[in-house]
Each structure stands twice: as C-alpha cells, then as structure tokens.
Image: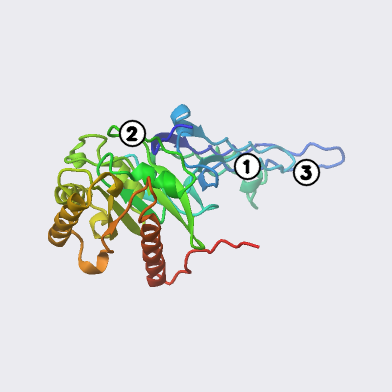
Amino acid sequence: MKFLDQAKVYVRSGDGGAGCVSFRREKFIEFGGPDGGDGGRGGDVVAECVDGLNTLIDYRYQQHFKAKTGMHGMGKNRAGGRGADAVLKVPVGTQIYEEDGETLIADLTEVGQRVVICKGGNGGFGNAYFTSSTNRAPRRANPGLAGEERTIILRLKLIADAGLVGLPNAGKSTFLASVTAAKPKIADYPFTTLHPGLGVVRRDGREFVLADIPGLIEGAHEGHGLGDRFLGHVERCRVLLHLIDATGEHAGKDYKTVRAELAAYGAGLDEKLEIVALSKIDAVDPDHLKKQRERLKRAMASSGPPPEARGPLLTLSSATGAGVTEALRAVGAAIDASRAEEGLATLPVEWRP
C-alpha cells in the first residue's frame, strides 16, 4: 500500500426533503383535513477515526463525497426518512483543515472519534404543520433546506512515542529494522527512505512506537532533497533520537545541520527532548570515534537544546548491536518521564504468562 499523508477532498451534505401537500380522502370522514408529512433531514458528512489505517491513499482515487438527500414527506402524516451520512474513514493522527490549509477544523487522535464536517439540511414542513384555527386547509409546504458544501484538506501526522532524525544514510532505517519487526528499505545510497515508517519496540518489558522519517539535508526547509514536509510526523513524538554517522567527515557540522532544519521548521521540534547517538561505530577506529565525540560535544553545547532537554551522548552500532540496548533504555526512560509530567500512566508492560 502506498503512503499518502495529505489529500484534498470536496464534501457536500444532503439536502432536506420537501414537505408534502396532502388531504385525507377517506370514506365516512366528512372533514378530512390536511395530512401532509414533513420532509426528512439530509445526511451529514462525518469524519471518523478508525483502526487499521496508516495512510490517506484512498483519497487519491476518490475526492468527492456527497451525503444522501432526505426523503420527501408523504400523505397520511408520514414524515420522510433521514438521508444517509457520508463517512470519511481516516487513520489516527489525521488533521482536518479548511481549504486555506491553515484553519484547523478537527484533530483526530483516538480511535472512534467522530466530527461532523457538514450538517445536512433540515426537511421542509408539510401542510399539516400550517393548520391553524383560521386556516383549516392550508395548501402550502416548505421545500427542504440545501446542504452545506466545502473543500477540506486531510493531513496525516503519525502518532509515535519517539522519532528518528538525522542526515541521509545516518543509519536510521537500519536501527529501526534492528529493534522492531519493520522492514524498511536499506541501501548504501542517500534517500533510500522515501516515506515515514513505523515500528513497535518491545524491550525490557516496555513497549513504544518508533517513527523513522526521510533524512534531512541543509536547506530542507526550502525544499532541498525531500524537503521537511515529513517532519510533521515527529511533531507528536515525546523524544527525538538523533543519529549522527560516525563515518562522516565532521559530526559537529552534521549535528548543526539537522538542528538548523528543526528550528527552521518550527512547531517546537527544536525544543523537544533529544537523545544524540553516534551510529556505525563498528566502521571507524577508536581514534576517529574519539574525535567525532569531541566535535559532537562542542556542537551540542553551542547549538543543541538546553541541558534539561538533552539526554546522554551515546554510541551504537545497529549492525553489531553494540549500544542499541542502552539507546532504547534511554528513549524509554525519556518517554516515561514525559508521560509522568503530563499525569499519564507509564508505558504498558507486555504481559507474559
């Protein structure tokens, strides 16, 4: 299934049904009188958050959704039925915006959440409604009200507890594959990751969701490389695991490049709790690794987050497994601390018989 995190959709609610003009014509009833029923209400356009979806690909092939018109009123005081709703099923983490892309209508973060985007039109009154002491046989009825229509933008932001950031080929996909059951594409050239990926980490009785996004390069906020549009998927993360390639030329410069892109994107990404790790340590000698650590420490002191929003500097190798457990424990502890600050329960512990 292809990944799509933004879609533009036209929606329209149903018109209300028209009221009915009718009179009783029954044997042995001398003065029948009006008996026209009211029209039914038009269907609503509803967005519903459902489980089992992680992409908006369905809305690439269908962009128009219209609810049904309410049934018209009928004789014998029979009211029309309500029109069927048009339900847009979206994954967890979907935001709904107006056509301008800035006005937020709803943010669906839990399975089962529903929001009415367009309300259906009210049904018209039948002639029985207009009966009065002076007008015993009204010959008028109301038409149903028209439904609403609008164009909306669906924007998906994956919900994960921790996010992986870094330059291309920093080892993010390899790390994700080594600690979860996810199978991202891994190769020895930049930008092998074209779409965000999710994996569930289960270590030390702890379980959390880890998100991997395509690599950032200098000028990503201006559209260079794959741009920074995928950074929206780590906006909801509680902690960022920043991987720096130990085989690179200068770890400090690489760190500053990614930090600059996080700050340029905004949304508080540069203020999130950050854990920095040098990856691919199995491919460098101890002297080069020591230089890279020193460069990285200087860069973190000058351009990194404040000490209270910074975790320990780690080293790891996803290929050999060295340092991976320590990194996961640091990430898990940071997530637990963040949840504790918000008064939430700690991460669920997987039960085993």
Which of the pair 141/47 is nearer the observer? 47
Q: How is the image coloured?
A: rainbow
Which residue has dot 2 on it? Answer: 192
Answer whether labels 2 and 3 touch (C-beta < 8 Å): no
Query: Quarter of the image holding residue 319?
Result: top left
| Between discs 2 and 1, the one toward the N terminus | 1
| Between discs 2 and 3, the one toward the N terminus | 3
Regarding residue 131, the answer to whether it shows in the image is yes
Calculate the distance from the C-alpha at mark 3 to the C-alpha at mark 1: 31 Å
- Residue 305: which numbered mark, if any? none
Quarter that holds the C terminus: bottom right
- At 49% from the left and 39% from the top, the residue drawn is 147
Amino acid carrying label 2: it is Thr
Find residue 218 and report its horizontal and vertical position in percent.
17, 41
Secondary structure of the residue carrying numbered label 2: loop
Calculate the distance from the C-alpha at mark 2 to the C-alpha at mark 1: 51 Å
Calculate the distance from the C-alpha at mark 2 to the C-alpha at mark 3: 82 Å
Find residue 274 and report its horizontal and vertical position in percent.
28, 59
Which of the pair 192/289 is nearer the observer? 289
Secondary structure of the residue carrying numbered label 1: loop
Which residue has dot 1 on it? Answer: 82
